[in-house]
Image: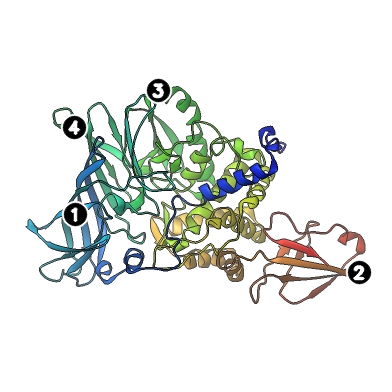
């Protein structure tokens, strides 16, 4: 086990106010992909976007077949989406989402045009009669326009029309939170993923287009233009379907993983190949560590890619966006302040971790996004532990606590496209770490992590499903623990009092009935409630007594 490194000298020399500001800035920037719905009042548009409306409820997406032609000069796109869907109940009006200023120009079903009306970012498409349950249908939606431009991606979402350092066009999209409907028409709700997808991207033949899955076709249909068709064979989130367009070169290698050979490919701007080859060696290192903890990589059929992007990074399924400058840490900084975060590339580890939590297991409502971010943030700890030892991992996760704000609950409001606090990252990870301590069996804990990815393989879930699974598999009732950390901003306080050779203890600053077990620094387990409990003990054993630092709690000695 390696010695824990001190905070880098450069960090220690920063004046305290500036250091504090820097830490806060990191928290803000890593708290969410983009600002989601932060409003205090909600409109009909929020409900249309965030809920399963009547016009969404009667059909399930089977596949998307997207074709686009971006125009770099005019900052516009034109395309179509063939949406195949299964009818699950009678219905004749379909909700399709496409955000202003994009426009749907035509909808075709069985060779006939359909009428439509628009309400903000929602189109209602009317069929001649109610669809027959059980049938598989397809609509073709043609669209065009100048999409919203991302001014500060990935935190501010939209299309990215920029240039590389040699002045050549470089394009992509960042749309988690904002929604895939910012650039293509779809059923823009996290609960309904297409079972498969394809995206065809027509670009000038001086450029290369990369997307999710495997390259199925590269063909020229008109002079000076090349179309790249990428296909995805697994279910995929709407916001994960992403094009990357630029002067890319690529190389490949094979990872011998738990399910056999996994095709790994790397796409970078041509002038970055040398440093990318060195940095991207961490890709297979990450896969090895995370397969150990989480189980087989969930998308062997679609391969694993790291793609250089014109923004910091994002967990685009089987095509992870990378923009961390080919340096370790988070843009060269350690978010934990412990030194361990500089041992590896934050974007490679964190965004690859989302292939299990976020892409394999997806929450039905973004209010439950802590399942994506809490477990994925904890993957950083597990990666550190895998390569540097358990003490290193524990030091790292404890260091992340300085970034927790406890500003509002981690779980947001359901049905209005609203996420919870950005604490879903650091606090969510520390909740997972605390639960691990209570389980007190790393083999069982690992089995639960792998079991989650097997039980909910390629599924959308709720927080309650995850809670119930952990409770059942651990044989422990964590209901109060989940309620405390996910649904309040309170950090539970363990009150300790030494009196007449006895130790008195209880929980405060917590919900009613909070009963989480806790281990003390001397290895003694306590089972506090919100009422005082008493334990006979020798005075020598109580000197300097505190809680095990692996528990995310406060301690108050009276």
Whichever of labels 2 and 3 marks the residue nearer the N terminus, that label is 3
Q: Quadrant of the C terminus?
A: bottom right
Where disc 4 sits, the SS reads strand
> Disc number at residue 219?
4
**Residue at 27% of width from left, 66% of height from top?**
56
Cα gap from disc 1 to disc 4, whole angstroms: 27 Å
Provide the residue designation for mark 3.
271
The x, y position of residue 448, in whole percent, is 54, 57
Q: In which image quadrant can residue 529 be found?
A: bottom right
**Residue at 49% of width from left, 46% of height from top?**
353
> Disc number at residue 501?
2
Where disc 3 sits, the SS reads helix
Of tags 2 and 1, the one toward the viewer is: 1
Residue lying farthest left? 112
Q: Tell me if mark 2 has few (under 14), some (14-19) or many (20+) residues whose alpha carbon lies within 10 angstroms of its own.
A: some
Front in this rendered view, residue 121 or 522: 121
Q: Tell me if mark 3 has few (under 14), some (14-19) or many (20+) residues whose alpha carbon lies within 10 angstroms of its own.
A: some
**Residue at 51% of width from left, 50% of height from top?**
294
Where disc 2 sits, the SS reads loop
Front in this rendered view, residue 28 or 392: 28
């Amino acid at each position: 086990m390696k010695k824990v490194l001190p905070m880098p000298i450069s960090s220690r020399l920063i004046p305290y106010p500036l250091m504090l500001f820097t830490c806060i800035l990191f928290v803000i920037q890593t708290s969410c992909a983009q600002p989601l719905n932060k409003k205090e009042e909600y409109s009909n548009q929020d409900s249309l976007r965030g809920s399963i409306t009547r016009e969404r409820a009667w059909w399930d997406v089977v596949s998307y077949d997207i074709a686009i032609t971006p125009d770099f000069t005019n900052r516009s796109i034109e395309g179509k989406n063939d949406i195949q869907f299964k009818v699950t109940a009678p219905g004749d009006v379909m909700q399709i989402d496409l955000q202003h200023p994009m426009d749907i120009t035509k909808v075709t079903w069985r060779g006939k045009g359909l009428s439509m009306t628009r309400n903000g970012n929602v189109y209602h498409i009317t069929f001649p009669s109610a669809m027959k349950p059980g049938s598989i249908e397809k609509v073709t939606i043609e669209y065009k326009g100048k999409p919203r431009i991302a001014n500060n991606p990935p935190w501010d979402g939209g299309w990215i029309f920029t240039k590389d350092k040699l002045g050549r066009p470089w394009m992509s999209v960042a749309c988690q939170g904002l929604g895939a409907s910012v650039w293509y028409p779809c059923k823009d709700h996290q609960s309904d993923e297409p079972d498969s997808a394809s995206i065809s991207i027509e670009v000038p033949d001086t450029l290369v287009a990369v997307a999710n899955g495997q390259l199925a076709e590269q063909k020229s249909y008109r002079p000076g233009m090349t179309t790249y068709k990428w296909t995805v064979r697994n279910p995929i989130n709407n916001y994960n379907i992403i094009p990357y367009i630029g002067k890319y070169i690529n190389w490949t290698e094979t990872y011998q993983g738990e399910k056999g050979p996994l095709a790994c490919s790397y796409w970078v701007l041509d002038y970055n190949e040398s440093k990318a080859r060195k940095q991207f060696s961490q890709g297979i290192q990450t896969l090895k560590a995370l397969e150990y903890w989480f189980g087989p990589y969930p998308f062997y059929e679609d391969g694993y890619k790291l793609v250089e992007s014109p923004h910091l990074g994002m967990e685009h399924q089987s095509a992870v966006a990378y923009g961390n400058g080919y340096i370790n840490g988070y843009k060269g900084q350690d978010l934990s302040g412990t030194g361990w975060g500089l041992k590896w590339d934050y974007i490679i580890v964190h965004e690859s971790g989302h292939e299990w939590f976020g892409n394999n297991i997806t929450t039905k409502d973004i209010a439950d996004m802590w399942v994506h971010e809490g477990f994925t943030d904890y993957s950083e700890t597990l990666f550190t532990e895998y390569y540097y030892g358990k003490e290193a991992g524990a030091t790292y996760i404890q260091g992340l606590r300085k970034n927790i704000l406890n500003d509002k609950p981690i779980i947001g409001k359901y049905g209005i496209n609203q996420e919870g606090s950005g604490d879903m990252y650091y606090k969510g990870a520390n909740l997972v770490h605390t639960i691990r301590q209570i389980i007190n069996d790393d083999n069982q804990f690992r089995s639960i992590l792998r079991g989650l990815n097997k039980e909910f393989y390629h599924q959308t879930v709720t927080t309650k499903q995850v809670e119930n699974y952990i409770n059942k598999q651990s044989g422990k009732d964590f209901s109060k623990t989940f309620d405390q950390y996910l649904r309040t901003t309170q950090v539970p306080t363990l009150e300790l009092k030494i009196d007449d050779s006895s130790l008195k203890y209880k929980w405060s600053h917590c919900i009613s009935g909070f009963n989480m077990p806790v281990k003390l620094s001397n290895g003694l387990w306590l089972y506090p409630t919100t009422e005082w409990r008493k334990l006979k003990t020798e005075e020598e054993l109580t000197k300097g007594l505190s809680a095990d630092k692996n528990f995310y709690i406060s301690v108050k000695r009276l």
